[in-house]
Image (spheres, grey):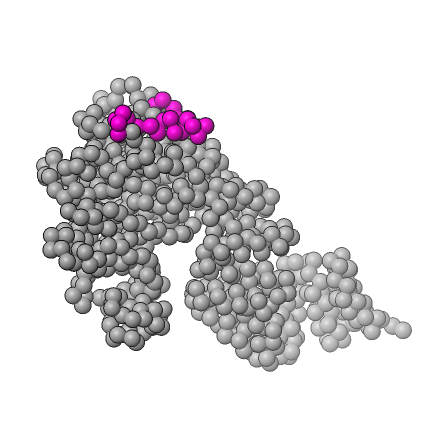
Amino acid sequence: MSYCLNPSCQNPTFNPVDTKFCLICGTNLLLDNRYRATELLGAGGMGRNFLAMDERTPSKKRCVIKQFFPAPQILNNPTAYQKAVELFNREAATLDTLGDESSKIPRLLANIEQDKRLYFVQEFIDGKNLLQELQQQGTYNESQILQLLTELLPALKFIHERSVIHRDIKPENIMRRRDGELLLIDFGISKELSGTVMSIGTTVGTVGYAPPEQMTYGESYPASDIYALGATCIHLLTNTFPHLLYNPQEQRWTWREVIASQGKSVSNQLAQILDKMLQQDIRQRYQSADAVLIDLQPNPTLPVSTPQKITPPTPSPTLNYKLRNFIGIVITIVVGLTIYKFFQPSVQSPPSTIPSLGTQPSNSPSPSLSDSSALASKYYEQGRKFRQEGNNQAALEQYNKAIELNPKYANAYVSRGIVRDDLNDKQGALQDYNQAIELDPQYAIAYYNRGIVRDDLSDEQGALKDYNQAIELDPKYVNAYINRGIVRKNLGDKQGALQDYNQAIALDPKDADAYYNRGNLRKSLGDKQIALKDYNQAIALNPKYALAYYGRGIVRNDLGDKQGAIQDYNQTITLNPKYVDAYYARGNVRDDLGEKQGALQDFNQAIELDPKYVNAYINRGIVRKNLGDKQGALQDYNQAIALNPQDGDAYYNRGSLRKILGDKQSAINDYNQAAILYQQQRKTKDYQDAIEQINKLSPQ
């Protein structure tokens, strides 16, 4: 579907995906002849957000279009309208400046004016914001808050060093990607510093998170963002909005009493840090992110040297990797009257590069503890960059350095585990996930990834436990339900698997993987017509889903639709020219249709891709025999038996060929061996058939 961007269009969803102009109002459906909106994500007082695809990329990558479309009360107020335009343009400029330098900040793809309307386009990332995470998982524990601070404080340091104040930090504006990394989003009301102090301006922010100097006087400093981050932390610790945690009569925070009433506690060190972040008097508050990072160290009283600032060079744009969900944000602006800022989806930006970090001379000061945390984060980001580029060895080295600098960096262990898994170091990956879970027992992603490795190592019961734990921690973890369904199916619990796939689809009706796996299960249960519907849905959601075409091809063939099966196998091979099973399956159908030469070509291709594909040798042997190439057929059966001496079909077909060649005794021997194997494998019908052939050849 193409979504018309014209706000006045009477039926914006009426257009097929390949339409260039709206069938209702005639508006050009391609923004800048490139970006096609496919779904309205949300709308607010200043505009609308759309899920979109970039039609100039081969895979039509997803992105997000932000359209400036202010509410009537803003349009009718010249001052408010001018401020809204300024904020919209400033957000695009901020992303353009900062996004290419840090993976913690969204990256701008385009800034466009079309049909007298303003737009900009951002990268799209799957994930959830921390308010969604809180609603799904419940309150955070101390280790999660420490991890949050360790990850985001370097991001605040980064933007503050570039004279930018965010001004609206809150759980909705912090997003966790599927690989666990946190991003700082929504720079719509950020503002540049003028020197060291920002002049008095428009009062903006969100009540409860914005500090007094920002809400009362419109002034913002680095310490203002630190206050907002502290308010975010106590919200996540208590599941209570910050304005309900402050007693204005007594002029004090009550969050400690609230967590005590919930039967929880935090260490004195963390409590003191949060209290200092939340000081009403800005002079008593932390003045920089570095100052907080220093106090976060296990022994903050140790003397530290003056941190040396490291400014990374501007990198080239890169793409990102893995695990899905979705994000939407509404923020409050006060511009004389209350202006509601429009919905903000998450985007993803490339990581910054790391300057050369050689061995320090013996007489130079050692790095400060806060600097070590910042450097660990930079190594982590560089590792992500290398992993996205497919350079796993380089990524591994960067993650090693990050962990060496910060041995409690749970995300780095998970990311290193993913790389080790990709490098087939399953045991190493398992160790990393174990360490991440030890550091943070509430880390659902770590359990999920450990489950994948355990399944690969044939520890299906261990994998099942990990998926159970991931789902317990995050009851809306779609991928965990899908993978648990796969394990349950393999363990024989097909009804349990069906429940998991159903739950995944209920949580995310647009998850093609859930439909595909449910189709596989229904096919195994004999519900082929229903399986066909699941494959159809998977393909509708993802037209480039090679596995779904392959699965549908098998079902179509089973239902007698051989031409439909051929079409599906053709599409599978078009999408994945190295999909060996698709060639094999297409060869079988072609043979059934009498296309012997086409079948021969497919079996040849399957064997070329996989020289140990036993069934391909057997079926090629059958085709060769039917084409009169009996010696070629004999060679194929011999090769199949050499690869798998326990394959009864190879002996049976060789016996049939030897019978044709007049070598009765050898044929009897092959049928006899086939009968033995069929009996062992409890293939009763095949066993009886082999015995019948022996009886026909034996002397009466």
> Do we see residue 404 in this rendering?
no
**Residues in magenta, as a range:** 248-269
Q: Residue furthest right?
A: 700
Q: Residue at x 14, y 37 (%)?
A: 217
Q: Nearer the viewer, residue 374 or 424?
A: 374
Q: Is residue 231 visible?
A: yes
Going by the picture, which residue comes out furthest to the front?
A: 249
- Looking at this view, is 380 or 278 the one in front? 278
Relative to 364, is 468 on the left or the right? right
Check the image and report above or below for 83 versus 296. below
In percent of width and height, residue 7 lies at 25, 66
- Residue 700, relative to residue 473: is it above or below? below
Residue 450 is left or right of residue 236, and the answer is right
Q: Is residue 410 left or right of residue 454?
A: left
Quadrant of the image occupied by residue 576: bottom left
Question: How many labels sit on residues?
Answer: 0
Residue at 27% of width from left, 70% of height from top?
9
Q: Horizontal and vertical percent for residue 464?
A: 57, 45
Within the magenta stretch, is there residue 238?
no
In the displayed structure, 4 sits above or below 230; it is: below
Q: Position of residue 52 (x, y in %)?
A: 31, 62
Q: Quadrant of residue 194?
A: top left
Q: Split into 4 quadrants, where in the image is the C terminus?
A: bottom right
> What residue occupies the far bottom of the structure in this picture?
594
Q: Is residue 262 magenta?
A: yes
Q: What residue lies at 52% left-to-right and 50% top-to-bottom?
A: 481
x%, y% of residue 614?
61, 62
Residue nearest the viewer, comparing 539 with 317: 539
Q: Quadrant of the N terminus?
A: bottom left
Please tell me which residue is depicted at 44% across the width and 69% down the height of the picture.
Answer: 574
